[in-house]
Image (cartoon, rainbow, N blue to C red):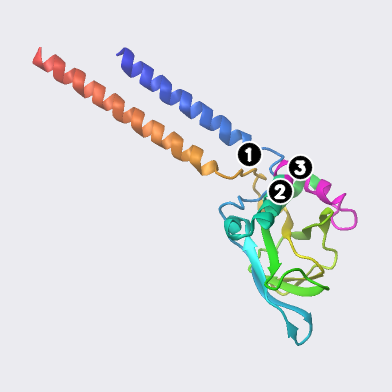
Amino acid sequence: MKRTVCLLLAILVAFTFAVSSFAATSDEYGNFIKSPEMEYEGNVVSAWFQPGQAIEILLTPFLNRDILAKDVRTKIETAYTDILHCKYISDLAGGFDGVYNGLVSNLAVSTLFDLSWTQGDLSRDATITIGGLDLSHFVCLLHYGEDGWEIVKNATILGVNLVFSIGNLSPFAVVVDASAYGEAVTSPATGDIFTAVAVCAAIALGCGAVYFISRSRKKAEDII
């Protein structure tokens, strides 16, 4: 009986720690609509320096950052950390005056991705069209440039696509009004799924052990 109680207590402790972990990643400072670790969105529809001079721009979502060069991967991971831990998204770019007039606490990032040119760094402004994004509650596009986060002020919605011109490429973040989604802004730190798996494993093993001990005890009593 004592062993059974100890096992049940161990399962309860594991579950308690897991709940604490989940709570720590779902507070008001998360600033993400959904985990960039689990989602893939966005594709380059077109890119050009001037009409008739197309260029090839690659879009890499945060999910696939492992394929990026080390320095580029470090940059997008730093960008992710900035978003994850800032108090308000507007703090990243020095305020959203003239861009958003609602509560800054409602702002969140829906998509985080990196853009790169196949031939190196851009030498001049390129016009880029991005598709495959949910732009229904779009507020602005942020760019993680040489001096940190900045608003891409010429970003506009054209049909179902996002169009903007820029002279250097690196991480970008799509900012939306999170209140329109009717869901709490979350803080999905990378690797959160491991905690869930660990808890399920602990519960399954614990239940199996309890069953084994109970069955062994019953057999012993039957023999006696």
Q: Nearer the viewer, residue 6 or 54?
A: 54
Q: Choose top left, top right, bottom left or bottom right for residue 212.
A: top left
| Total residue callouts | 3
User: How many residues crowd mark 3 within 10 Å: few (<14), some (14–19), many (20+)?
Assistant: some
Q: Is residue 101 left or right of residue 121?
A: right
Q: Is residue 58 left or right of residue 128?
A: left
Residue designated by label 3 = 86
Q: Nearer the viewer, residue 159 or 86?
A: 86
Q: Picture coordinates of residue 37 (x, y %)?
A: 58, 51
Residue designated by label 2 = 78
Determine if residue 103 is in view. Answer: no
Q: Secondary structure at mark 1?
A: loop
Residue designated by label 1 = 26
Q: Nearer the viewer, residue 114 or 25?
A: 114
Instruction: Name the amino acid, label 3.
Output: Cys
State which quarter of the image contains the N terminus. Answer: top left
Residue numbers of the magenta segment: 82-102
Q: Residue at x 63, y 39 (%)?
A: 26
State which quarter of the image contains the C terminus. Answer: top left
Whichever of labels 1 and 2 marks the residue nearer the N terminus, that label is: 1
How many angstroms separate mark 1 from mark 2 (CA)? 20 Å
How many angstroms separate mark 3 from mark 1 (CA)? 14 Å
Instruction: Name the amino acid, label 2.
Output: Thr
Q: Picture coordinates of residue 59 (x, y %)?
A: 65, 66
Q: Choose top left, top right, bottom left or bottom right for residue 140.
A: bottom right
